[in-house]
Amino acid sequence: MIKAILIFNNHGKPRLSKFYEHYSEDTEQQIIRETFHLVSKRDENVCNFLEGGMLIGGSENKLIYRHYATLYFVFCVDSSESELGILDLIQVFVETLDKCFENVCELDLIFHVDKVHNILAEMVMGGMVLETNMNEIITQVDAQNKMEKSEVRL
Amino acid sequence: MALKIVKGSIDRMFDKNLQDLVRGIRNHKEDEAKYISTCIDEIKQELKQDNIAVKANAVCKLTYLQMLGYDVSWAAFNIVEVMSSSKFTYKRIGYLAASQCFHESTDVIMLTTNQIRKDLSSPNQYDTGVALTGLSCFVTPDLARDLANDIMTLMSHTKPYIRKKAVLIMYKVFLKYPESLRPAFPRLKEKLEDPDPGVQSAAVNVICELARRNPKNYLSLAPLFFKLMTSSTNNWVLIKIIKLFGALTPLEPRLGKKLIEPLTNLIHSTSAMSLLYECVNTVIAVLISLSSGMPNHSASIQVSFSRHAHTFSLKYLGLLAMSKILKTHPKSVQSHKDLILQCLDDKDESIRLRALDLLYGMVSKKNLMEIVKKLMLHVDKAEGTTYRDELLTKIIDICSQSNYQYITNFEWYISILVELTRLEGTRHGHLIASQMLDVAIRVKAIRAFAVAQMATLLDNAHLLTGNTQRNGICEVLYAAAWICGEFSEHLEEPMVTLEAMLRPKVATLPGHIQAVYVQNAAKLFATVLRGHEGVPADSMVAQETSQLLIDRLPLFVQSSNLEVQERASCILQLVKYIQKLQQKDVEVAEEVTALFAGELNPVAPKAQKKVPVPEGLDLDVWINEPPSGSESEDEGRKSKGKAVFAKEESRHTKPRYTEVDEKELAKRREVRKAEQANNPFYIKASPSSQKVYQDGVGVEHIPVVQIDLSVPLKVPGMPMSDQYVKLEEERRERNKADKKKKKDKKKREKGEKGRRRRGDSGPESEEDITPAHMVDIVTEEMPENALPSDDDDKDPNDPHKSICWAPCVNTAGYGVDQPPLYLSPHPSLSLAPHLQVCDIQGNLQDGSQVVVSVIFENKCDSFIKSMEFNVLDSLNSKLQRPDGAGPHDGLIVPFQLPPGISNEARFIFSVQNIVMPQKLKGTLTFIVKTDDSSTHEKLDFKLHFTCTSYLITTPCYSDAYSKLLESGDLKGCSLKLEGVNQPFHHLLARICFHHHFSVVERIDSCASMYSRSIQGHHMCLLVKTADQTVSIDAKCDEPGLLGNVLDEIKLTFSQC
């Protein structure tokens, strides 16, 4: 199970947070801060896994992250997930964003967090991986956007 | 109406949308909070409007603010309103907001049930999809119960998009409403074979999550998953399945054998590193569960590691995998020692910590010093106290593991400990201290050395404590003072040490250390007195010492610490009294020494348990009658009394000890732990004592202050552990040389004949390393009348305890014509039903068949069922399996065994070559069923096919016999047995019985015998006896077989 998906920038500003377990708003902020603290002090060329974020579930869970330019993509997962599998998934996520936003950058995420949520919803549902095929994800996201547009015209 | 809409859209033009909000927040960096609060006010206004578009916009902004940490639960009802909009755009906004901020205690969720049900059955697949996605985040037990049926219907929806979402959300429904699992499971299973790969993947996902919670229940799905594994091309699905198999194999060993091949194929064919890694991981799990797959084992580690070495992430995972192997096959990991040591240099802390974990399991007598030396280097280099402390604990763990098993030179270890005290700002002073105490107490031979070291430490105490008294490392002074005091007879200059212990600076140490200082100063004083009394010239020294104590102790008498104060004033008075006596020239040394006489031995952890309860003592009986005061009195005492006595109602019945005792015991244990930790005289022998100590003293609370010293702290006059490494190497060299010399000597004695291969100077084996000095680790003390028993390691609940391997001869009824062969169990396994081979007999009808009768006897108290008998075929011998079974399948034993019952089963083996005896390895798997659970067990055994078992008793007439001998086809061989003092006819009966021969003719003390092998080899024996010597001349047309049979005959007679 994926426990949480966090995207924040190099300064720790959250760009997307999706928790699949309920926490209070304060705890969520604390988790984001702690995760940022753990991840940001690590070198570029070290492994992408971290054990023991204290707040989400403790030692059972791992943080798996990737750093792209100004953004960190962090997945907090339990032991049922494959570490390298999740790394691949993050890559799929980012490539999908790239396709949907055409050369995605931090600003896209800042102003269109709702769209990022919609894309993510086609990949991960309730903490479980729904789809890993990028084309399928994009097809579904496009179809929904088309529907939205047709509604606006009405 | 139209007007309203127009008005609404005009309003909207002035509303902020999400982008405006974000922009606004970015433009108000200084007063962000203030800006947001005005925005929230605006949003509240917007939510009051009727226009759903305005509401949706407001909710969208709220979702963003929620991410920034603002509580938006007050808008929950508005979110539900937006969710129920008929437009997809708004519905999606509503569901997203709900998924971000709804949870089980959100009360408006109750209102959503019907809306969600409507959306689930919407003709638009995206309405349904959005509802499912939202629901997956906020499903409650009530929602799960009410909607389970609707979702189950969706699992068979025509659109795969809906099917996969419905399948996936079922897991959440199961979690919240477990009753739904049973009715939904068949459909879920069906979805594993859905034509759409996405749906398939979802089903695999759900079942993997379920199986993780309870793998046993999903074993039956293994064949289906196996099929998927070989057919699917979706890496994500494969990874999930392979991970699942990794969890299943320990439960079902047969699965492992089947898996190896497809997994190996995947390893070689896949390009996805993630899949490769999971394959390797599962292969490891399989090999561990099989315990027989050693050959290709190292190969797969090699694969994992060599491929993994280049990227950092893979390095981490490689180490993770190795730690799994290490648990069961330490040898195969040990060969990668250098690689792991390299990982310690890695700049990534995750990797270094993993490598450290591995090192723990890799040490041996041979490499301990080398590894610790490397670690010490890292300690010096390490930045950051966390990692350095981790290193320190690991060094101590590594050295002290299994009772200092790997330490050959304790002097070296003491100097390592002393070197570790140079660490600045470590939290683990107490850990080092407890190691010093433990070693000094338990290793008698090292005491002199330890005392000398500790004396130097005390002398240089100022270096350890620095300016700060709140430094964790000063804990070692506690140990140093105690060791110097307790073993003061080894001190060369007790005066110097005594002086060092009474310096004014000591008063800045923590109280519990000062207390030990004071007490041990007294011990040292006793030693000094003893050393100097009787010699007139020295009496001055003794008196000076008394004066020193009298001068210095008042400082401690003023201490604010009660313990220090009390001890100091006691000892001060004592010394004053002694001084008076000294002035009268009275000899006091003996009396003073008597104060501290007696040796303290370590107490075994189990000692307390071993004290036998004296006869007539019933610990469960009240010592005093429980107080029987009036009701009111009882009430008044309730709060106090509860902890000590059982509940009031129990007064008349037997006191309910259990629950109260648990609490009470725990409490007492805590108190005792604290006491022990502060008591230098109580030393627990087990390594766990270190922990106790740590808990008790509470040094964690002492804030650690880092000393900023540019010059590394080095205690002058301290031996460096490196010297010991060198010394040790030299010593080993010398030992080796000595041995070689001895060998050479022997060689020379043996002369030319004994020309052996020269002992090449390859790596020395573990046994070659002898300890530097014979160090006797003092055995732990046990109560005098404790019963020496070995059973205390055994868990009384151990289900295998009842099943034993006691050999029992069972020959009745089966026509056994050879001694029963006991299947020799794998050394580590002493469980299982009793197994016994009562007969291995060749088959007359078929020249290549051997029938093995096995008696299974259930010696445990539980029911045993589903036994499966399997043998690892060799090239020569194969277990005959029913048609269609694979070469590795086991045979099902056709019966079950209630407790205490035995039964016989026969297995047929086909054998090609009967010339050589054979041993076959096999496994028996079975299920032990107890009242409440059933466990899967396995038993390894060996099946021994002797050459005799290929012989069949065949009668032969003397004329045919002589013809056979005359034919000249037979080759001869002979055997002499000496010291056989049994009657000749017994001897013949023995050969007939055990080796399947028949007597052809017997004349006095001479007999001819005959037997035939299943493949038609003739075998003739001529047995003669004279003066306790039996000579057997044998002839056979297969000399190999003959030789082996003769060996077996010889063995039979040597055993009687």
Image (spheres, coloured by chain):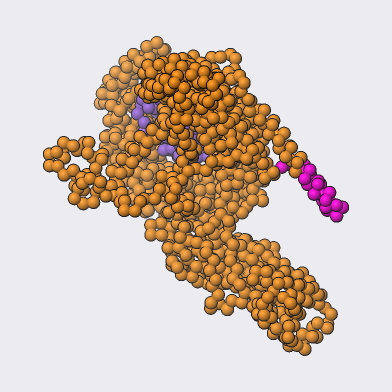
Query: Where does residue B295 sit, x and y in percent of width and height?
Result: 66, 51
Q: Quadrant of residue B384?
A: top right
- In the image, residue B399 sits, relative to residue B712, either above or below, namely below
**Residue B1002 appears in the picture as rendered:** yes
The span picked out in magenta is B740-764
Left or right of B977 in this view: B170: left
Left or right of B204 in this view: B820: right
Which chain gets the purple colouring?
Answer: A
Q: Nearer the viewer, residue B768 or B493?
A: B493
Query: Where does residue B725 sit, x and y in percent of width and height?
Result: 67, 31
Q: Is residue B248 magenta?
A: no
- In the image, residue B927 sits, relative to residue B853, either above or below, namely above
Query: Where does residue A58 sit, x and y in percent of width and height?
Result: 44, 34
Which chain gets the orange colouring?
Answer: B
Q: Residue at x 58, y 18 (%)?
A: B713
**Residue B305 appears in the picture as rendered:** no
Q: Residue at x 38, y 18 (%)?
A: B557
Quadrant showing the C terminus of chain B: bottom right
- In the image, residue B918 sits, relative to residue B415, either above or below, namely below
